[in-house]
Image (cartoon, rainbow, N blue to C red):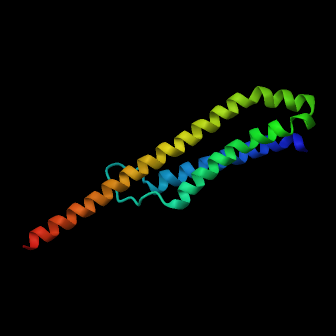
Amino acid sequence: MIDLLPAVFWIVSIIWAVVVCVICVRRGKLLQPGHPDVEPVRWPVIGAQLASLILAMVPFVIGKVCQDSFGADALAFYISAAWPAGIVSVLLIGTELVLMILQAQRATYTEMGAALHATHATTDKQ
């Protein structure tokens, strides 16, 4: 049973990272053309990204700490899968960061547009 822990935690971390990416794409309206109104990145999303980073490390820590209790086949599998799993995890975490930056950039456009519109509205009244 302990042989499965790193794989299960890795799958959970990958699902978590994909969910964070989907949240950023949806809330940032990244698939819509132009400059739609977008809210800034919320703190819970930033916390979820931090949790994603920690979750990505858990399978490797478990694998290192428990490697003496793994069977020979499981140990060989984890040794061969460590680099590809790490690369996938790092790419997903990088993707989360890029998507959060894109959302923040679109939110800045929204705030600038609102500020400019308010400035023009007060200038037009005078």
What residue is drawn where x is 25% and y is 63%?
115
Find residue 75 and report its horizontal and vertical position in percent: 86, 30
What residue is drawn where x is 92% and y is 28%?
72
Residue 26 horizontal side relative to residue 37, left or right: right
Camera-side residue: 31 or 52?
52
What residue is drawn where x is 50% and y is 45%?
97
Find residue 31 and report its horizontal and vertical position in percent: 43, 48
Residue 48 horizontal side relative to residue 64, left or right: left
Asked where in the image residue 122 lies, by quadrant, the reply is bottom left
Find residue 76 and report its horizontal and vertical position in percent: 85, 26
Answer yes or no: is residue 30 visible.
no
Q: Quadrant of the C terminus?
A: bottom left
- In the rendered image, the residue lying farthest to the front is 65
Find residue 19 and report its horizontal and vertical position in percent: 60, 51
Q: Vertically, is 113 above or below 74?
A: below
Q: Quadrant of the N terminus?
A: top right
Residue 126 horizontal side relative to residue 36, left or right: left
- In the rendered image, the residue lying farthest to the left is 126
Camera-side residue: 26 or 105?
105
| Numbered circles on residues, count | 0
Residue 24 horizontal side relative to residue 112, left or right: right
What residue is drawn where x is 47% and y is 46%?
99
Camera-side residue: 107 or 66?
66
Answer yes or no: is residue 74 visible.
yes
